[in-house]
Amino acid sequence: MLKKFLLTAAAVGVLASGGSAETFVLSNYKHWSVSYVENDNSEVCIANVNNGEGLGFNLGVAPAYFGISIVDPRIRPGGDLNFDMEIDRMGRWKIDSAQVRSGNVYADLSHASSSFKAGLVDEISRGAYIYFRERGAPRKDWRYKFSLRGSRVAVDELLKCSKRLGTW
């Protein structure tokens, strides 16, 4: 039930409205699941990891979309958010103008360079943990931390799914 909520929340940010979405789980491994979600107008592949407490991190790929989202039922709508993301506390990725909606923060990275996207996906697949904090917060004040254990398998499945959509 929780995974279905997290996937639905992630898909809402990607799929245009136009009918109900159908979700097909392609694989589950460790804390990760990879799904294909479609409605009448759109389709997306989503890799999702959750911490078991209602919080989740998603990586979504569609023909005209590449993005990440954080699912947290405590998030209230309120404009845009700039945040920093680190994988294994190494290099920092700056994410600007993420949309804040009720229960979700969406960062559409479709406009990013191919090397940025490939580097991010590669680091996620090889990393142990991913951390998020609001820009300007003290470096040790991480708001979210997700395990990337099993992410290599999840990313492989996500790439297979995205190739079926004609992306990557």
Image (tube, rainbow, N blue to C red):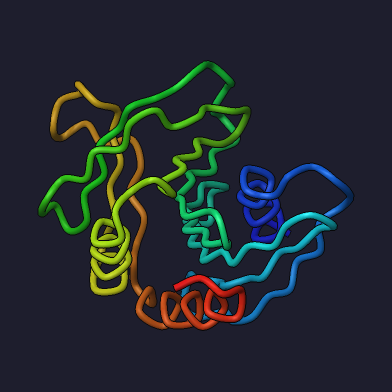
Q: Nearer the viewer, residue 86 or 145?
A: 86
Q: Is residue 42 above or below residue 162?
A: above
Estimate the x, y position of residue 30 in percent, counting from the top left.
46, 77
Residue at far top of view: 78
Task: Tell whether 5 sits left or right of 68.
Answer: right
Give the image quarter of residue 115.
bottom left
- Count of residue discs: 0
Question: Residue drawn at (76%, 63%), measured in percent from left and top?
Answer: 38
Residue at far right of view: 19
Task: Tell whether 108 sits left or right of 114.
Answer: right
Q: Is residue 139 above or below residue 168?
A: above
Question: Residue drawn at (34%, 72%), measured in percent from left and top?
Answer: 149
Task: Tell whether 9 sits left or right of 110.
Answer: right
Estimate the x, y position of residue 75 in percent, counting from the top left.
54, 28
Q: Nearer the viewer, residue 111 or 94?
A: 111
Quarter of the image with the C terminus is bottom left
Question: Residue drawn at (56%, 64%), measured in percent from left and top?
Answer: 46
Quarter of the image with the N terminus is bottom right
Question: Residue drawn at (46%, 51%), measured in percent from left and top?
Answer: 67
Q: Nearer the viewer, residue 56 or 59?
A: 59
Task: Tell whether 140 sits left or right of 52.
Answer: left
Give the image quarter of residue 87.
bottom left
Q: Is residue 116 above or below residue 165?
A: above
Estimate the x, y position of residue 16 in percent, counting from the top left.
73, 45
Q: Is residue 17 above or below residue 66?
A: above
Estimate the x, y position of residue 18 in percent, counting from the top left.
85, 46
